[in-house]
Structure formats: C-alpha cells, structure tokens
Amino acid sequence: MTSTTDASRGRLRPAGRRRRRPRRLSTHAATGGLVAVLLVLTVFSVLAAVANARAATRAEQSAAVSEWSDQAERSLLLMEESADQLAVEDDAEVREEYGAASAATRSALQELGAVSGTGHDELVGGWLRLHDSYQQAVEDLIAVAQWDPARAEAYEDEFVDEHYDRLEAVVEDEAREHWLASSLALDSMRHSQELLLVATPAVFGVGLALVGWFTAVLTRSRRETVAQAEQNRQQALHDALTGLPNRTLLRQRGEVALSADGGAAAALMLIDLDRFKEINDTLGHAYGDLVLQAVAGRLRDTVRGTDTVARLGGDEFAILLPTVDGPDAALELARRALAALEAPIEADGVHLDVDGSIGIALSGAHGTDVETLLQNADIAMYAAKDRSLGVCVYDSALNDHSPERLGLLGELRRAIDNGELVLHFQPKVAVPGEQVCGVEALVRWQHPERGLIPPALFIPVAERTPLIRPLTRYVLDAALEQCARWQAGGLELHVAVNVSARNLLDERFVDDVLEVLARRQVPASWLELEVTESAIMADPARAQRILARLAEVGITLSIDDFGAGYTSLAHLKDLPVHQLKIDRSFVAHMAADRSNALIVRSVVELGHNLGLTTVAEGVEDRGTWERLGELGCDVAQGYFLCRPLPAEELALWFDRVRTAAVV
Ligand code: C2E
Ligand code: CA
Ligand code: CA
C-alpha cells in the first residue's frame, strides 16, 4: 500500500462529541423537579391528614367533655334541687335522690377529668374537693334547717350557693375551654383543607407541566442519542475530509458485491496520486486538502451512482464497480478517471497538476474476497506506477508477494550484511581518442549456493521494498571505496552508480550520498549517478529537487536507458543532468536497423543541443563503434570494449589497453 501522509491522517480525527453534557443536565433537572413536586404533594397530603386526624380527635374529645360536663351540670342541678327539698324537710326518699345525684356528680366530674386529657388528676382532685365541700355545706344546711328553719334560707344564700356556684363554674370553664380548643382545631382543619383545595391542583399542575417537560426532554434526548449514533456510524464509515466512504465501508460494499448472484464480475480499482506528497510538502496541508477534495469530486463524477468511490487514506483512493462487463470496461472507466484528474486543479488561485496510477483487480479472475482483490489491485497499481502505464490490470506475473520473493528478500537482507554483494566495473570509453573516462559499477550477488546472481534477478525485487536503500548505500560505499583505492594507485577513474526509482523518492538519499562521499574521501565530481527515465517520471518534481541537490555538490548525473521511457523534452531541458545514456536496445541494433540508427542520431543531436554528453551503451561490435563515431556520440560502453569485470581483472585490462589501442 502507499504510504499515507501525516497531514491527511491528522484530518481524519473524528469530530468532537458535542452537547452531551447540557442535555444530560436538563434530564437530571427534569427528574429532580418531578421528584420535588411529588415530595411537596406528599408532604402536603400527610400534613393535611395529620391536621384532620388531630381535629377529629379534638372533636371527639370535646364531644366527650361536653357530654360529661352536661352530665355533671345536670346531676349538680339535681343535687341542688334535692338539697333545697332537704332544707325544707329531711325526707328519706329525697335524701336518697340527693345521695344518687351527688354520686352521679362525683363520677361525672371524674369522667370529665378523664376525657379532658392527661395532667388533670390535680384538677379533678380540686373539683372533688369542691364537690365534697359543697356536700358538706348541704349537710350543714340540712342541720341548720332542722335546728333553725328560719335561718336555712339565709344560710343557703350565704354558704351553700357559693360552693354550688364554684363547682358549676369549674365544670362550665372546663367545657368552654374544650369547646375553644376544638373550634380552634376545626378552624385549622378547615384552613388546611382550604389550602389543600387550592394547592393540590396548583402543585398537580406544576407536576404535570414538569412531567410534560421531562417527557419532551427525554424524547428529544432519545432522538438526539439516535441521531448521534447515526452520526458516529457515518463518521466511522466515511472519510472526514472528503466525505467519501472509507476503507471499512468499501470492504463492506465489496463483500455485498461479491456475494451478489449474477454473472457479472465486480472490479476494484486502487488509485494513487503521483504528485500529492510534493504538493503537501511544498505548498502545505491546506493545498493538499483542497487537492484531495477536488480529486474526490472528480472521481465521484466519473462513476455511476451504484459504484463506490472511497478514500483509503493519504492520497490513496479506490473505486468499486459492483458489476462490470470484463476487464476492457474496467480499463475504460479507469482511463476516464485518469482523464478526469488530468486538468489542473485550481486551489486558492494556484493551478496544481496531479496525475494518478490505477491498478485494477476483477472478482473471480483475480480474487474471490475483498482482501485479495485489494492486494492484487495494489500490486497492479504499483506496476502501473513503475512502468508509467497509468492503468494496469492485475496479472499473476506481477505478483511480487510470492513465497520465492519473500524468501529472496530475507536472504538478500542477510547478503547485504554479510558482504555477499560484489561489484563488477565496466569501462566507459571516449569515442574520439579512445580514452577510458570512467567505469560503471554493476552489482552482482555472490550467493554461497547459487553462485553469481545477476542484478536483474534481485534488483527489481529490492526496488519495491525499503531494502533498496541499504542496497544502494552498500553499492555506493563499495564503488567509492574502490575509487579511492584506484586513486591511491594513481588511477583517476570516475565511477558511476545506478540509482533506483525508490531512491529518488527518498528525501534521505542525498544525505546518504554525501555521507558516503565524506567517509570515503572521494571528491563529488568523481561520482556519477545513473537514473532511469521512469525513476524520474515516477515523481518528476521530487526527482528534480533531489537531482538539483546532487548536481549542486558537483555530482555528474546521467539519464539511463534514455529513449525507452517517456521523458518529455519539456522535462528534460529542466532537469539538472549532464549525460544521456542511449538505451542499449537502440544501440545494439543500430547497424542492422535504420530506424534505430535514426533514433541514436537524433538522441545524440538532442543531447548536444541541450549541452549534454551522450553515451551509447551495449556496443557489441566494431560496426556500431565506428557508426557511433560518425554520429558524434561522445562515449561508448559495451562488450565490444570490455565486459563488466571485478576490480582486479579490470586492472589487468587497464594494463593491456595502456599498451595497446582500445580496439
Ligand atoms: P544498466 O544500468 O543499463 O546496466 C547495463 C547493463 O548492460 C549491465 O547489465 C551490463 O552488464 C549490460 N551490458 C553492458 N554491455 C553490454 C553489451 O554490449 N551487450 C549487452 N547485451 N549487455 C551489455 P547488468 O550488469 O546485468 O545490469 C542490469 C541492470 O541491473 C542494470 O542495467 C541496472 O539497471 C541494474 N543494476 C545493476 N547494478 C545495479 C546497482 O548497483 N543498483 C541498481 N539500482 N541497479 C543496478
Ligand atoms: Ca546504468
Ligand atoms: Ca542502461
């Protein structure tokens, strides 16, 4: 997969969860309010009930008090009437009536004391004493009447009535007191009843309003929770910056497409932007974001509504076509998508060029599950990028993830550490004058079991992995070490090292080169770096930047395999290069093939017009060598002159050519 940029990653952070706290607060407030209202209502009812109960007890008590005080008054009256008769005549029957009335009065007073409540013992004692003294006064009255009837009336008025009045007064007082208390209790009961009458509907109304509010809040909060859950789901399945489905949603839709019945295949395309990191790095993330949004829009406009455009992260997009009529239809759509990206993107007044590479995998032929399709589309996309094809449909031959490849990588890593990589050097000879002007370092793998392995078998594999960095560093180091040794032996030989496309995408590459030059103490002007056209075209702006830094320190730069790729002349004249190495396929056949000879001639002319040295590689025979001389080519390289050789053997070759002409 492509690397994802931090910038775009940073923007994928989910938006903050908002407004949860206040909603929860109001829910709590509503519940609290409701509870408070219910509490007030309950307290109210309890207080009212207590007041009612108390008033009822009071009423009951005061009824009893009034009954017993009536009783006491009635029997007291009977007592007085009997006493009045006894004062006239001491009749036995009347005395009996008197005794009964007195006993009834006494017991009525005791009952009255009892119903009047606690703490009345002393009071009742006083009443009984009053009763006794009244009785005593009546006894005295009867005696006075018998002894002196004339005085009886006066005695009664003077002594007896006073006792009677006092006893009657206490009974009346007690009754009045109770009547007062009970009417007060009734008053308070009426009061609380009235209050309850007004307050109950009011409090009930408030409670009802609160319940309504509470229900509304609860419903709203439930609705918001549902909406929030939906929003979270959307966020989890979509890219925040472009709003496109993300990898998860793409996978889900891919699974649905694969499980659908029907004959048509599904197609999965991976799209990687070629110049995105450059824009992000040089212009800033704001521009990068605008580009990604514009790309998202253009891709979306290219596809049907049933297709899915997804952003997988960084500058990597994907298109899922749930049904497609074979590879050609998928290819056509991919080309349309690339064409849509072609027009410059205007971001904040700046016109930005972005290109893309698309890899296609079809269900059935290239995988039966989404994961495999993604992997294979990725492999096809890399192939498209590497070969500057634009679009590439997956083919099992592209699959670098074979077990052999993985095993090879592990071994290669160890080979670098164990120094199993060796360099052969092939001389570059000036066509006029036949002077050796430098050597090209070509790596080989001296495998302990398999013998000498040519670079074509392991370089392309290493080039797709980070292993190419230590490998290139190793070759640079070994080449410059040899260069320093030749220098020490009096031989001034420029040495050329091949640089892979991936090295040119690595910003650390320049520092690696400078570090090795410093360590081996070789002047930068003795080092040549050979870069292929396709390596430059993988990311021209970045390549140009890195090449400029290398040229600045005095390193010679060659474009390798020139003519085989698609380097536009417009690009060529802006590149800080010094040499064009004409691809050996043109050179090897130039003697036999007129059009190849024409190409070589035009490249030589083009190079000269641009002020560049031209080098022909793959010179295998004298005819070619001579023809190159006629065409004005500056330098030649090839088996006809010398095969790539280990340093020691090359020394012998030097000895030979010093004594003889090169050819
Ligand atoms: P290249 O850079 O184009 O290297 C020239 C290739 O042509 C070499 O193959 C060389 O042996 C071969 N050659 C030279 N003269 C003739 C000739 O007259 N006829 C024919 N048919 N071939 C000739 P080699 O050494 O097998 O390297 C193959 C490729 O591997 C190189 O192509 C280069 O792209 C890559 N390579 C080699 N060493 C390195 C390295 O250290 N780093 C990287 N990145 N690539 C390397
Ligand atoms: Ca080369
Ligand atoms: Ca070459």
Image (spheres, rainbow, N blue to C red):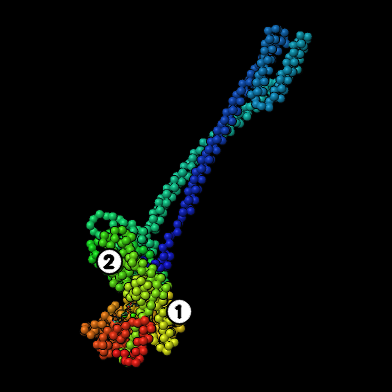
Residue 390: which quarter of the image?
Answer: bottom left
Q: Residue at x 27, y 60 (%)?
A: 363
Label 1: few (<14), some or many (≥20) within 10 Å? some
Q: Secondary structure at mark 2?
A: loop
**Residue 276 location in percent, x, y?**
37, 71
Is residue 43 visible from the viewing direction of this image? yes
Q: Residue at x 61, y 25 (%)?
A: 62
Three-letter amino acid code at the position of disc 2:
Asp
Q: Residue at x 65, y 25 (%)?
A: 116
**Residue 279 location in percent, x, y?**
38, 73
Residue 509: which quarter of the image?
Answer: bottom left
Residue 416: which quarter of the image?
Answer: bottom left
Answer left or right for 525 relative to 99. Answer: left
Label 2: few (<14), some or many (≥20) within 10 Å? some
Is residue 574 visible from the viewing direction of this image? no
Mark 1 or mark 2: whose residue is earlier in sequence:
2
Q: Secondary structure at mark 1?
A: helix
Answer left or right for 602 relative to 228. Answer: left
CB of mark 2 near ligand 1 (< 8 Å) = no
- Vertical position of residue 468 compared to residue 94: above or below: below
Between the residue at mark 1 and the residue at mark 2, the CA separation in whole angstroms equals 40 Å
The answer to whether the residue labelled 1 contacts the one labelled 2, judged by CB atoms less than 8 Å apart, is no
Three-letter amino acid code at the position of disc 1:
Glu
Query: Which sits in the foreground, 625 or 309?
Result: 625
- Vertical position of residue 371 compared to residue 657: above or below: above
Tell me the number on the disc at residue 515. Answer: 1
Q: Which residue is mark 2?
A: 395
Query: Which sits in the foreground, 180 or 516?
Result: 516
Query: Which sits in the foreground, 497 or 305?
Result: 497
**Residue 268 location in percent, x, y?**
30, 62
